[in-house]
Image: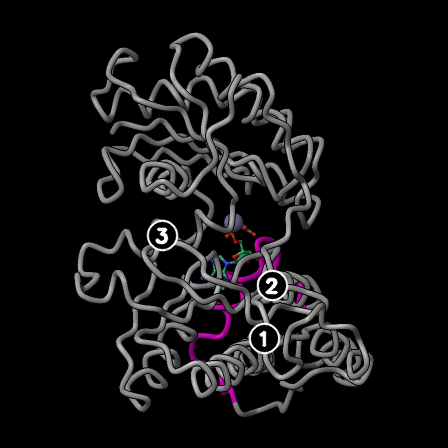
């Protein structure tokens, strides 16, 4: 089954062709980083306009690289949410047009299902584990969740962030440290060679979140990063000299990154203790982070759990994960295609009785 996938939920314009659930033939990604950099974050109007300008050429390139003809396609898949409304609209409108023009079914895919599925795109994923129940840490710029997964699909949400996402914490921290956007890679780069124990930043739920509603999830499986960002802000007010790139900055970035990573690992450890998964997985933009990958590896080894990390090229937003997820049967066919509506906020269902 050949699927053309389209992803425009945030600041990456991407199109891909998957041949069945395991093979991504092409995965073309245009990142808008340079356009948003002057503003220090994603500007929705700029993102949507750029998607309009770039998407046709990106789709053409994805079809060309996959050596796929329009007649050879079996379906068109698109991220319909969650994400920026005006950005989602561009991809969904284009996908509708392609589906109607080719007479192929249109499949709506949840962006986070795509991220979770990316773990299963690792060719080294052990066959016997595919059907077993795993515990996935999903860490991106907009989401931080602990999810049960099986057969490439989500089997329940165990925990989520009560405020900022992990990627958001890195992006906001990077802004405070003057490191630019996107923050995750900038913090990682600056942290290289820094002393991660130099500053003790908070790792737990912030005081403001002790009574925050957890929406049916266990509090000890939920995350909070707003206190960490505030701690950095206050630290910088007292110690502006730590912004010195030659002396203070690498230690500050390393300590801040370590706090984000430790907060993630602590919940993974707790969730693994509680749910006894067959394997551990990690996906989303922040899953590219080498320190996180390293510390997940250390925990997995100590717990005797196989660790499945999304391949780096499928961590940040990309249409390959959307096309492959649709080929695996994860999306929802929409008939007629014109009826598909965007869902800018589209929560993952919460685990029963968790
Ligand atoms: O999955 P993604 O591309 O978009 C969302 O769905 O949000 O994730 C983007 C996030 C940003 O917050 C970015 O700073 C973070 O992923 N990120 C990283 C790294 N690369 C991207 N964070 C830490 N280390 C990285 N190497
Ligand atoms: Zn994403």
- Residue marked by disc 1: 354
> As rendered, which of 216 and 136 lies closer to the eye?
216
Does the magenta segment cover residue 257? no
- Residue occupying the far top of the picture: 101
Outermost residue on the front side: it is 353
Q: Nearer the viewer, mark 2 or mark 3?
A: 2
Residue 279 to residue 54: above or below: below
Q: Report the residue at 49% width, 21% height from top.
A: 95
Task: Specify the quadrant that holds the N terminus.
Answer: top left
Nearest to the observer: residue 170 or residue 161: 161
Q: Quadrant of residue 235?
A: bottom right
- Pointers 1 and 2 in contact (C-beta within 8 Å): yes
Report x, y in % for residue 179.
61, 62
Q: Is residue 195 magenta?
A: yes
Q: Secondary structure at mark 2?
A: loop
Q: Residue 188: x percent and y percent?
A: 48, 68
Left or right, 335 with respect to 179, comes to left
- Residue picked out by circle 2: 350
Q: Which residues are magenta?
A: 177-196
Which numbered disc flags the more N-terminal residue, 2 or 3? 3
The reply to whether the residue tagged 3 has its Cβ within 8 angstroms of ligand 1 is: no
Which structural element holds mark 3? helix
Element assignment for label 1? loop
Q: Which mark is residue 118?
A: 3
């Amino acid at each position: 089954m050949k699927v053309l996938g389209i992803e425009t939920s945030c600041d990456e314009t991407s199109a891909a062709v998957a041949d069945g659930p395991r093979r991504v033939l092409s995965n073309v990604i245009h990142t808008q980083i340079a356009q948003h950099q002057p503003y220090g974050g994603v500007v929705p109007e700029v993102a949507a306009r750029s998607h309009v300008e770039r998407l046709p050429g990106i789709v053409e390139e994805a079809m060309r690289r996959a050596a796929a003809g329009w007649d050879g396609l079996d379906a068109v898949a698109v991220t319909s949410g969650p994400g920026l409304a005006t950005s989602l609209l561009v991809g969904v409108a284009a996908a509708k047009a392609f589906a109607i023009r080719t007479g192929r079914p249109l499949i709506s895919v949840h962006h986070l299902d795509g991220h979770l599925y990316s773990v299963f795109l690792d060719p080294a994923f052990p066959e016997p584990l595919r059907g077993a129940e795993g515990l996935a840490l999903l860490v991106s710029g907009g989401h931080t969740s602990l999810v049960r997964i099986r057969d490439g699909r989500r089997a329940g949400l165990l925990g989520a962030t009560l405020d900022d996402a992990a990627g958001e914490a890195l992006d906001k921290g990077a802004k405070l440290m003057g490191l630019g956007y996107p923050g995750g890679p900038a913090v990682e780069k600056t942290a290289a060679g820094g002393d991660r124990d130099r500053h003790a930043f908070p790792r737990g739920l912030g005081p403001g979140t002790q009574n925050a509603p957890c929406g049916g999830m266990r509090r000890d499986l939920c995350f909070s990063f707003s206190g960490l960002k505030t701690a950095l802000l206050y630290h910088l007010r007292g110690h502006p000299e730590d912004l010195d790139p030659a002396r203070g900055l690498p230690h500050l970035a390393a300590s801040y990154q370590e706090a984000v990573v430790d907060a993630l690992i602590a919940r993974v450890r707790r969730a693994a203790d509680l749910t006894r998964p067959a394997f551990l997985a990690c996906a989303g933009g922040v899953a590219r982070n080498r320190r996180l990958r390293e510390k997940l590896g250390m925990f997995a080894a100590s717990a005797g759990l196989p660790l499945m990390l999304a391949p780096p090229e499928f961590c940040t937003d990309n249409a390959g994960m959307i096309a492959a997820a649709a080929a695996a049967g994860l999306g929802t066919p929409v008939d007629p295609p014109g009826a598909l509506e965007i869902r800018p906020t589209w929560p993952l269902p919460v685990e029963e009785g968790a």
